[in-house]
Amino acid sequence: MNLFQKFRDGLKKTSTKLATEIKRIITRSPRLDADALDELEAALVASDIGIGTATDIVARVKETGSPDVFAIARTEIERELSNVGAALAPRPPASPTVILLAGVNGTGKTTSTAKLAHWLKSQGHTVLLAACDTFRAAAIEQLKIWAGRVGCDIIDGQYGADSAAIAFDALEAAIKRNADYLLIDTAGRLHTKANLMEEMKKMRRVLHKRLPDAPHEVLLVLDGTTGTNALHQAREFHNTLGITGLIVTKLDGTAKGGIVVAIARELKIPVKFIGLGEQVDDLQPFDPKSFAKALFTANEIQESP
């Protein structure tokens, strides 16, 4: 299955809802008068792409006078999402790329850590995992199971242990083993809990002390089904931790997949991967063109030439 088809299948709920609404509006008012344009903007906002992007799309439709809303929307979305780079930080000389994964409970953070490891291994990289979610005993076991499934070594500790100490030990091991990547699964934390955010800052300081550029990435894992709440989480985590990229999960289970656009537009944080299903290979590198095309595919609607 090619990348676009994966995006297309994963975003089906969002794209189907958008296509149905746009078809209804165009069918009733082919000339797209003022009322129709207002309805179009409301339909776009309902997909959580953000008011700013929705307004831009409607303005472009009005300016061109074209009824091909899908083509205009694809162009605007691709432009919006291409403003920030999405590649992972390259491996530094003679040391691993260190990636911290953060997020609230229930976003799929531990699973995304393992899926990212699987993707990196498929690219020919060696990966070491660190189980630093010591607040939830099941998280350690879960990551151990995933490590065996994807074929990665793992550094872990006891339930309740100092997560920063485990991260330090994992970095030492990654350096000694000449691993390409060290992926650190951290405890789920509410963005409003200052003490848990301080623990995350401590982990960053410990890693930085051992390896001056570490961590090279701080990826925030967001649940796409939460819509605008994901934007609030991203804003708070970014203010506290300096997020370098996003992993947006569960996009196959929501009609609000447009939240990816809203977050990227407001915070200028690149979306690096998106989760489009439950299989180990359903975490895909983000591609703006494929995303825009999948989000605004007309389905059974006959688009204008």
Image (cartoon, rainbow, N blue to C red):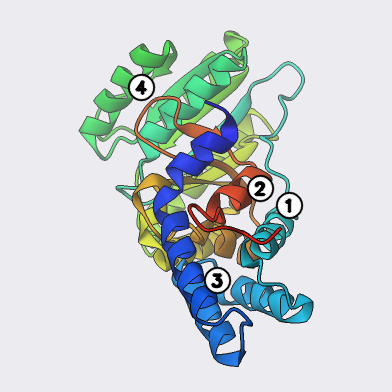
Direction left: furthest residue: 138
Residue 11, horizontal then vertical, whole percent:
46, 48
Asked if the residue at tag 4 contacts the one at tag 3, i.e. Cβ–Cβ closer than 8 Å, the answer is no
Q: Nearer the viewer, mark 3 or mark 4?
A: 3
Q: Amino acid at mark 3?
A: Gly
- Pick whichever, 245 or 129, lies toward us: 245
Q: CA distance from mark 1 to mark 2?
A: 6 Å
Q: CA distance from mark 1 to mark 3?
A: 16 Å
**Quadrant in which residue 71 is drawn:** bottom right
Residue 184, horizontal then vertical, whole percent:
47, 31
Q: Amino acid at mark 2?
A: Pro
Q: CA distance from mark 2 to mark 4?
A: 36 Å
Q: Is residue 65 left or right of residue 27?
A: right
- Pick whichever, 144 or 120, lies toward us: 120
**Labelled disc at residue 82:** 1
**For marks 2 and 4 on the same chain, the one whose residue lies earlier in the sequence:** 4
Task: Characterize the local packing of mark 4: few (<14), some (14-19) or many (20 or more) Cα atoms within 10 angstroms.
Answer: many
**Labelled disc at residue 50:** 3
Task: Characterize the local packing of mark 1: few (<14), some (14-19) or many (20 or more) Cα atoms within 10 angstroms.
Answer: some
**For marks 1 and 2 on the same chain, the one whose residue lies earlier in the sequence:** 1
